[in-house]
Amino acid sequence: MESPRTNDTLSASERKRMRDRKAQKVAREKRDVRIKALEDRVTYCERHHGAAWVQHMMAAMETLQRENQMLRERQERLCAIFSSWEQDETTLQAMRGDMMPIRIDPSNASADPLSTAPPLNIGVINRDGMPLQESRPSHSNPASPLFPSETASGSIPAWSLTPINEYGHISPPLPATCPWLAHPDQIAACPSLPSPLDLLHGTRRNFLADKISQAIRVRAIRDPERLASGWLIYVFSKWRATPTMAAFSHIPPFLRPVLLQIQRGHPAAIDLFVFPQIRINLIKNWDKYDFTEVFDYMSCCQKVRWPWGEDILERDGQDNLRIRREFFDVFTRESGWGLTPEFVEKYPGSLPRIG
């Protein structure tokens, strides 16, 4: 503090300059204190909320968005189910034709799979895919893959009913035969239909096609079965992970679930067997077999009725490779498939019986 004597000896302008300097000094000190506080805050934020934290928050937000989308889709499916219950008989008749409901008595749906009675010929073929005997038409099969959609008050859409792939505690644990189904979010992002080259050779652009290609490539099978099986597995898995009417419409009728598949738990791989009656028989007694061995045999013995050496791909108008129309028409029908004698001899009890 200035003494009265000093103030008396200073002029008014000098006293003003002195006051200004003191005010500037106080302002600088306050500014330095504020800057230091801000620097400390920035250092704290960088230490505790850096780039990794921001990425973590972004990933959490994306996960929540995907979950919300799945919840909205499930809500839409439920709304569609409830709405269908209120439709009149005319609409129900149309839905029966489109969605393929069924009235099945489960007690008579199939024969005992462990029976040693003569098996029904479902199309036994040789290793080249040619029939050994004429097969019966698929429409005569009492296990036609039709949905139990009708109820007393209405009808449930077929596309909303998915198989039960829970089968209790098996010792030793059953290996996962369709591991890609554990990633529904990644499957949802895949195209509705696969590229044939992606199924045959794998790809980095289509998660589902690549996983199926990897699983099939370890099997000793021809390219026709590799492509046909891959396509069927793809469209079924696409619907299984994201059940919608559009996805369901891509599944050939013979591969659509039968009543027992949506009533009783079973390994997911059974859903991919092309013969509905064999699916029923194995669902009832799959735990009595060495299921891994059954699946391996079926993978090699399930053949497309396609001549050896015939092309399975063709060029479209843009010179891109696509599945040949004649080949597509064959493997998308149950009558286009058969079993080699090795499977028939190894597992006669898994085949349906006559009468």
Image: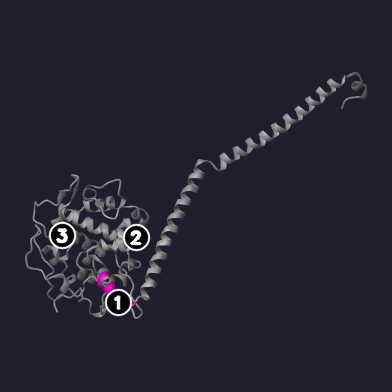
Q: Residue at x 19, y 54 (%)?
A: 227
Q: Nearer the viewer, mark 2 or mark 3?
A: 3
Q: With respect to residue 281, does 323 lie above or below?
A: above
Q: Label 2 is placed on what type of residue?
A: Thr
Q: Is residue 36 left or right of residue 164?
A: right
Give percent across and percent down for residue 171. Answer: 32, 65
Q: Is residue 198 left or right of residue 53?
A: left
Nearer the observer, 93 or 267: 93
Mark 1 or mark 2, which is nearer the start of the sequence?
A: 1
Q: Are marks 2 and 1 in contact (CB under 8 Å)?
A: no
- Residue 347 visible in the snapshot: yes
Q: Which residue is mark 2?
A: 242
Give percent across and percent down for residue 265. Answer: 32, 69
Q: Which residue is mark 1?
A: 90
Nearer the observer, 351 or 135: 135
Q: Residue at x 27, y 46 (%)?
A: 203
- Span shown in magenta: 88-98
Tell me, for residue 329, which label it has, or none. Answer: 3
Give the Cα separation between the discs numbered 2 and 1. 29 Å
Q: Are marks 3 and 1 in contact (CB under 8 Å)?
A: no
Give the Cα separation between the discs numbered 2 and 3. 25 Å
Q: Quadrant of residue 300 in the image? A: bottom left
Binning the other alpha carbons within 10 Å of mark 3 as few (below 14), some (14 to 19) or many (20 upward) gives few
Q: Label 3 is placed on what type of residue?
A: Asp
Image quarter of the N terminus: top right
